[in-house]
Image (cartoon, helix red, strand yellow):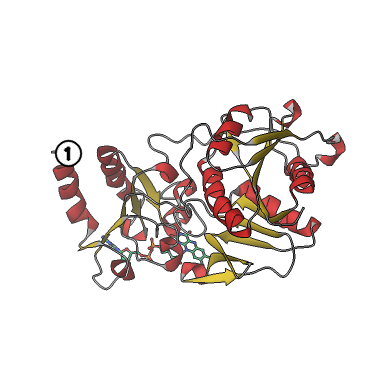
Amino acid sequence: MSATGVLIWAEIADGAATASSYELLGLGRRLADDMGGPLSAVVLGPESAAAIEQLISRGADSVYVFDDPDQSEFHTDAALLVLEAAADKVEPALFLLPHSSYGTELAPRLAFRNESAPAMGCVDGRVEDGKLLLTRPCYGGRARAVVSFRSAPAIATLRPKSQEPLAAEPGRQGETISLDINIPPETIRVNVRERRQNVEQGVRLDEAEIVISGGRGLGGPDGFKILEELADALGGAVGASRPACDLGWYPQAHQVGISGKTVAPDLYIAVGISGAGQHMAGCAGAKVLVAINKDPDASIFSYAHIGIASEYQEILPEILELIRR
Ligand SMILES: Cc1cc2nc3c(=O)[nH]c(=O)nc-3n(C[C@H](O)[C@H](O)[C@H](O)COP(=O)(O)OP(=O)(O)OC[C@H]3O[C@@H](n4cnc5c(N)ncnc54)[C@H](O)[C@@H]3O)c2cc1C
């Protein structure tokens, strides 16, 4: 079999494939078609049955499943063996993994085992003259680097919210292949002893259609109260810049940016945020960006579709009042 296919690692949560798995399928489908190869997915865990159908309906030609009750907890050590077992059958030209905590651990280990190199945090890809090219942000999100691979197979992680997921095509046919592999217990060197769910109230930040983010310009944690009221009124979620999180004003799970979450809402309202490249890398996919900043020369205004040069304490209560009315 020639190496022309793409193999994606599909993450499963609560029995369903995650949104980022669909994005991987979106990019993977395009690249596999351009290389003239198949698109395959690998899933791990006893809850994967429902996910298989979803993955096929959204672009996978085949899904490799390791459905072992002992793998109810995710172990990178086991996942590596499962990926390798699937790769033995597919011989992919490209492994595509999510840029999640699991994906970013798996990709370098996979690269080491394959004597290849990983391209981390990619946002796009294409095939040009038969050569696979991947794009990723660099210099803190100020520029984009296009990378190619000297070694094979190519291995890459994809940032969430960077690709359009393919729409589901009901009735689409694909193959499901069970992987029959033995994972000796001594292979699993890290054990999950406790799992704590991050309790998020209201709309999830990475799924919200409206995000209102606050930065250092809010002056303290109290500044986030009016952002929460606005998010409630609009059915949105609250985000924060890195300094606001580092200073403990808002939970780190809400950080937007290159070292935080990537969001692509219909509306992003940045309040007291200067517009550093590292922050903008996390919200560049917003359809409409509104900036509220007291400094009319703040660089955020060069990105904003609508700019309001004002102290947020003056303008936000008025906006909230209008929305509530
Ligand atoms: C490797 C690396 C990774 C990073 N990752 C991230 C990341 O993921 N996310 C991120 O956000 N940053 C990240 N940063 C930090 C980034 O470079 C900036 O320092 C940060 O985004 C600035 O945050 P800020 O805009 O909240 O604060 P500032 O730059 O201090 O801006 C505050 C703004 O608030 C305005 N302001 C002040 N008072 C008011 C008021 N009353 N009303 C209205 N406006 C007001 C000011 O005019 C100013 O423009 C990273 C940096 C590095 C080096």
Out of 296 and 30, give the one closest to the viewer.
30
Residue in view at x 38 percent, y 34 percent: 202
Closer to us: 35 or 107: 35
Residue 271's place in the image compared with 203, above or below, is: below
Residue annotated with mark 1: 324
Specify the quarter for ligand 1. bottom left
On-image quarter of the C terminus: top left
Please state the horizontal and vertical placement of residue 253, each as a whole percent of the image.
49, 46
Q: Amino acid at mark 1?
A: Arg
Q: How many marks?
A: 1
Q: What residue is at 66 percent from the left and 35 percent from the top?
A: 175
Say which quarter of the image contains residue 279.
bottom left
Left or right placement of residue 32 versus residue 186 in this view: left
Q: Residue at x 63, y 50 (%)?
A: 97
Q: Quadrant of residue 30?
A: bottom right
Image location (x, y in percent) of residue 178:
74, 32
Q: In this image, 168 relative to 231: left or right?
A: right
- Residue 35 place in picture, x, y as percent: 63, 59
Q: Within 10 Å of the Cα at label 1, are there few (<14), some (14-19), or many (20+) other Cα atoms?
A: few
The secondary element bearing badge 1 is classed as helix
Q: Is residue 306 above or below residue 176?
A: below
Q: Is residue 261 left or right of residue 64?
A: left
* Residue at (15, 49) in percent of width and height: 318
Where in the figure is residue 312, as x and y percent of width and height? 23, 56
